[in-house]
Amino acid sequence: MAAKQALQKAFDPIWNWASRRYQAAVAKELKKYGLRYDDLYDDLYDLDIKEALSRLPQEEVDLRNQRLKRAMDYSMKHQYLPKELQAKQTPYEPYLQDALQLVKEERREHAELGSDLPYTRSLP
């Protein structure tokens, strides 16, 4: 047990450095297209995400769709967002996480109780 803690203590700084570098690289790529990390969740792949998106205010969903359309447009043109707009982007500002957490908690609670969910869960 002590050896495990010693190894963890020795490798934590390296792991933290690597994770910060990776997070910065992902943020740089998201800023190029004006996306947020939560925009990468696909509502066709996960029904919990679909339900969480349906619980968001329509304005937030419209902003998400606009960011995705803009990113696809820039990608198809092989261009990036202008540098001054990239500097204003906030790629790690969450907007979906709270609703997604609530949906997952509800699903877990309904599974424990053995009851059906109050909303339809079927793939399109």
Image: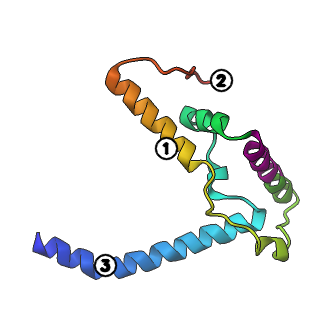
- Amino acid type assigned to the residue bearing label 1 in the image: Gln
Q: Residue at x 47, y 72 (%)?
A: 19
Q: Position of residue 108 (x, y in %)?
A: 39, 32
Q: Secondary structure at mark 1?
A: helix
Is tag 1's residue or tag 3's residue first in the polypeptide sequence?
3
From which residue to which does the magenta span run? 58-69
Q: Residues within 10 Å of mark 1 (few under 14, many from 20)?
A: some
Query: How far, Cα to Cα, is label 1 from label 3?
Result: 31 Å
Residue annotated with mark 3 = 11
> Viewer-proximal residue, 26 or 39?
39
**Residue 100, position in %: x, y?**
54, 42
Residue at image mark 2:
124
Question: Which amino acid does the dot numbered 3 rest on?
Answer: Phe
> How far apart are the alpha carbons under marks 2 and 3?
45 Å
Question: Which is in the foreground here, disc 1 or disc 3?
Answer: 1
User: Badge 2, how many Cα within 10 Å: few under 14, some, many 20+?
Assistant: few
User: Dot 3, crowdedness within 10 Å: few (<14), some or many (≥20)?
Assistant: few
Q: Amino acid at mark 2?
A: Pro
Of labels 1 and 2, earlier in sequence is 1
